[in-house]
Amino acid sequence: MSSPTVHYPSRQSLDQLSRLLFRGCDRQRTGTAKGELKREILALSRPQFDDMLELAHLNHVVMRGLEVVRELAREEGDTTRAQWAEGVLYAERARIETAVLFLSEICEAFQEHEYGVAVIKSLDHWPDLGSDLDLYTDARSEDVCRLMKRRFSAQIGPRSWGDRLACKWNFMLPGLPEAVEIHVRRLGQTGEQVEIAASVLQRTRQVRAGEHTFRVASITERLMISTLQRMYRHFYFRLCDMMDSAELVETGAIDYADVRSAATHAGIWKGVATYLQIVSDFVKGYRGRGLELPQLVTADAQFGGSDVYYARGFIRVPILPQSARLYTSQLVGVLGKGELQNGARLSLLPWLATAAVVGQKLTGNDKGIW
């Protein structure tokens, strides 16, 4: 029996949404660019709007994308499309407010027990929020599970082979649609990055999200975590990754020497440089200019935006040969430091990836593996 057809947003929706994000949010936006965006918005049919909205949800850019639609539609007196956007924004704001309240309460509970905790990934997209809540802690796994069960009546989600290697736990809380993913004492696709993990809590900074303040990873750790997630594990970018990282570059938030030092020690500097080059090239494709990256980044980038492609709702990074080379470089670096146990963990990644592909083809689901 054939599998049901799965709908994915069109390439046209990717192009429309990317133009809205990178031109609409551009501080140097010209009147001509604004006029082109307005004409594009006024021409949107409801099915086209819905397709673009589905893509925005997948890529965690609903707030930023729909705010541009609403703003420009209002300026043109287009109440219909402005109302389409406002309805979405109202629902998304309510979802985010609920999730952030839970996130604050979880962090407070960890702090009451004197467990180190920081929010990772989830608040990088602000004012958008991802589809789950991610935290890192130095507490023991048994203490984390006990706290989440007793304090929040949480249920522990199924753990894949990859989750167990990476020391990740997923919790479902009553009243919270999003899962809470807690990384315990390790980071990386197989839990091989213990030094990056240790530095997260040592170098946290505070950010405000709504009415709440959170400890989050420093800019350096944030970039390395994003790189590990996109270039070494999932092999795809979301539009939020492009926007978030571009903003870090353009606001001067990145200490490139610090990033290179930390990422080189972790064996992923080439991956970080390549990640930033891909972001720069992608942004250039939609607004006409890329990011002003220093030569130390561009010199070590292994490939760029011309190698990525759109498929199944995301911007995909080719695994062979590009990402495979980055993985090999990371493995050599880990083993070169004498970290045999972490190297053994990392060496399992190709087997996990292969098993995930086979599982996907046989059952339509790779969750028990990946």
Image (spheres, rainbow, N blue to C red):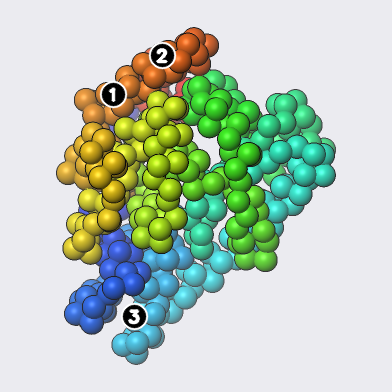
Is residue 72 left or right of 184 when viewed as pictured?
left
For label 2, the residue is 336
- Whole-angstrom CA distance, mark 1 to mark 2, is 18 Å
Is residue 260 left or right of 17 when viewed as pictured?
right
Q: Amino acid at mark 3?
A: Leu
- How far from the left and from the top, in percent, is residue 79? 38, 85
- How far from the left and from the top, in percent, is residue 109? 78, 45
Single out the mark in the foreground, 3 or 2. 2
Q: Residue at x 33, y 64 (%)?
A: 21
Q: Amino acid at mark 1?
A: Ala
The image quarter in which residue 115 lies: top right
- How far from the left and from the top, in percent, is residue 350? 36, 17
Q: Residue at x 72, y 47 (%)?
A: 106
For label 3, the residue is 72
The one of 230 and 351 positioned closer to us in this rendering: 230
The image quarter in which residue 348 lies: top left
